[in-house]
Amino acid sequence: MTQGIVVVMLTLLLGIQPVTTDLYLPALPLLAVALDAPAASAQLTLSSLIIAFGISQLVWGPLSDRFGRRPMLLAGLALYSAAALAAALAPSMDWLIGARTLQGIGMGAAVACGRSVIRDLYEPREGARVMSQALAGLGLFAMFGPLVGAVVAKHTDWRYALGVVTLFGVLSLAFVALRFVETLPRRNPQATRIDQIARNWWLIGRHPTFIAWTAITCASWCGLFAFLSTSSFVFIDVLGVGQVAYGAILLSSSLSYTAGTFLCRFLLTRTNAARAVAIGGAFSLAGGVSLVAVALAGAHSVAAFLPPIWLFAIGHGIHQPCGQAGVTSPFPDKAGTAASLSGFAMMATAFAAGIVLGRSMNGTVYPLAFGVGAFGVLSAIVAWTLVRVHGDRQLHAPAAASA
């Protein structure tokens, strides 16, 4: 595969996550009303997907190390597409939650294998650059997904929004089936043995470089999840913006995130990944602290909230490419397991954050402000401590692509 094909494929595989979570967010309040369910139940359609996504990666990663990336991608994307269709046709909230859970399981294969492909084909620093290209493409889905979802929800209903998600799954499955060439250098027949999985988790989970990069991806992702899981209720129900306007708000956030991925790529040409993430930490801190400040000052308006959200999103765009490449960098022979373990940690922490945020939803702007604020501060702390000390062990020197 050419690098262009690899980038497009990674954009689809990693972009499946924001498409699945973001595109239906503008329809979330409508969904709750249509199925006669409380907001907490509607939010569970997101939380259940996230936890299934996280847990399933623990299975998909070792399976891909054992059988290869391609068969796992085909199986996972087929499951995802079927579950997405079931979600669009759901007659009840329980049905919808179950279908979204199955979607999360299928989505785990796409993301775990996508991250593994980077380590299969590239050395660590080059992998971070290619990852930043793919995540910039992902930013396009994150930009236009909510806007498309808002327009669809306004002129049709929430089922059509989930129908668009189904279409994305089918197209991704077709692309992988037609264009993806197996990247696993050597299959590991021991990868799926329970004792070997436990041993690999122990070796990977206590590695300082893995801990550092997993910590920054988790902290930054939790901040984004805090925004995604509360923003539709805050902006639509509390601040009174329309669905299309809310889609535009999410688009502006995604633009900032995409700018962060470009800034990441620029920084990696001039310094190492740990220093790039330290700069990202400054954006995370500035965004989180200023959002809390404007909320406490009583400036409860879209104009006051957007600049802090943009700053946090820029930091997120720096943290994710470096972090997602960094977690697999010490483990070329266990890339699938390392990627899945890191992915599980990201989703488990986000799920815990979602539970806390769901219980704190009180019809005010404060769950959003304090959620993003707390994780903005935490991202900066991790970037300036753990990543500074341990993060550049594998990503400090230029390396040529091996593809």
Image (spheres, grey):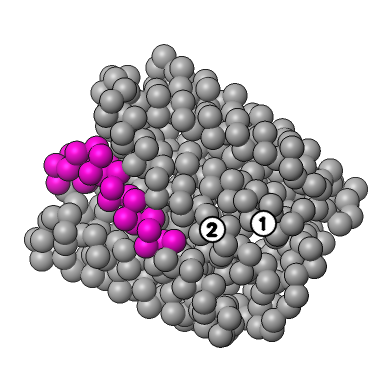
Place residue 259 in its image quadrant: bottom left
Marked residue nearer the N-terminal end (2 or 1): 1
Q: Nearer the viewer, mark 2 or mark 1?
A: 1
Give amino acid for label 2.
Leu
The residue that mark 1 highlights is: 4
Residue 272, position as x, y percentages in the image: 59, 82
Residue 202, position as x, y percentages in the image: 73, 61
Place residue 232 in its image quadrant: top left
Magenta segment? 231-258
At x 46% / y 30%, what residue is drawn? 164
Residue 135 numbered tag: 2
Along the line of sight, the residue nearer the viewer: 128 or 65? 128
Characterize the magenta stretch by its predominant secondary structure.
helix
Distance between the Cα atoms at labels 2 and 1?
A: 13 Å
Along the line of sight, the residue nearer the viewer: 268 or 34? 268
Relative vertical location of residue 171 with respect to residue 322 in this rendering, above or below: above
Q: Residues within 10 Å of mark 2 (few under 14, many from 20)?
A: many
Quadrant of the drawing holding the C terminus: bottom right
Residue contact between numbered discs 2 and 1, judged by CB atoms under 8 Å: no
At x 80% / y 67%, what residue is drawn? 402
